[in-house]
Image: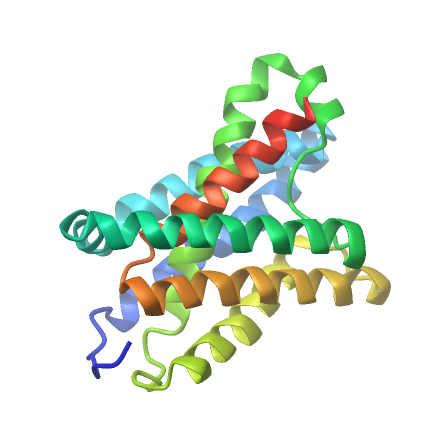
Amino acid sequence: MSEKSITSLSTKRIIISFLLLAAVPAAALLMDRLIDHRWISYMFSLNIFISLLIMYDWNLFGIHYNRSKNDPFEAVIYTLIGAVLVYAWYWAGSHLLKAEILLPPGSVLRMYGYARPGMLAAFSFMQASAVNIGFKVLTDRFSVYGREFLSILLSAVTFGLLITLSYVPFSFSVLIPAYLYNMGITAIMSYLYNQSHSFFPGIMSLTAVYLAVMILSM
């Protein structure tokens, strides 16, 4: 963004938003111990806690939706650009980096047909919302407006690390490629946000790519 803006989020809202984000991996871990199924556990946890996050930050969600609605051409353009960038990075992450990506394989989606709609929603829209709302909340107090590259870099380094530590097993060989992948995804989301002044193109592009990947894997 070229203009300097003042944070719109209170300290209380930032803390509670991060508690809801942190509840996703924590609740999934506890649920997995009961039902012994990682993907079902994450499905319930993402759908429940990210829905709560969206409702809690509904004003923020509405502001960014209205920004995209008021300039639909720009929103569509950056959603398309985002989809291309996300898919290219997803391909690189899965084929070159061999990164741990939080998407259920096709075998799981085929096996648990009753849970398929919930999984498709959780690992596409809910995950995309978590990334975009999360990095916005995290960087809300960063004084980097007018310095786009610094904003993108800080978002990628900090929130990419948080995502990786929350969802990826603590193994050096697994953490490094996953961190690089999550840094790239967050950087793309931050770029779209800086260009469109809304996190909606990021949500829609990440949702579309992850949803397409899961459907095609079935």
Residue at position x 80%, y 59% from top? 174
Picture quarter with the C terminus = top right
Residue 116, percent from left and from top: 57, 20
Compared across the picture, whether 175 is left or right of 116 comes to: right
Compared across the picture, whether 146 is left or right of 33 comes to: left
Residue at position x 42%, y 67% from top? 191
Residue 100, percent from left and from top: 74, 51
Residue at position x 52%, y 50% from top? 84
Q: Which one is in front, 70 or 130? A: 70
**Image quadrant assignment for residue 180:** bottom right
Residue 212 in view in this figure: yes
**Image quadrant assignment for residue 198:** bottom left
Residue 45 in view in this figure: no
Q: Residue furthest top?
A: 114
Q: As displayed, is residue 45 above or below residue 26?
A: above
Residue at position x 53%, y 33% from top? 211
How many labels sit on residues? 0
Compared across the picture, whether 196 is left or right of 166 comes to: left
Residue 94, percent from left and from top: 74, 49
Q: Residue furthest right?
A: 173
Picture quarter with the N terminus = bottom left
Q: Which one is in front, 218 or 25? A: 218
Q: Residue furthest left?
A: 70
Q: As displayed, is residue 187 above or below residue 199?
A: below
Q: Which one is in front, 82 or 115? A: 82
Residue 34, percent from left and from top: 69, 31
Compared across the picture, whether 3 is left or right of 166 comes to: left
Q: How did the renderer colour the structure? A: rainbow
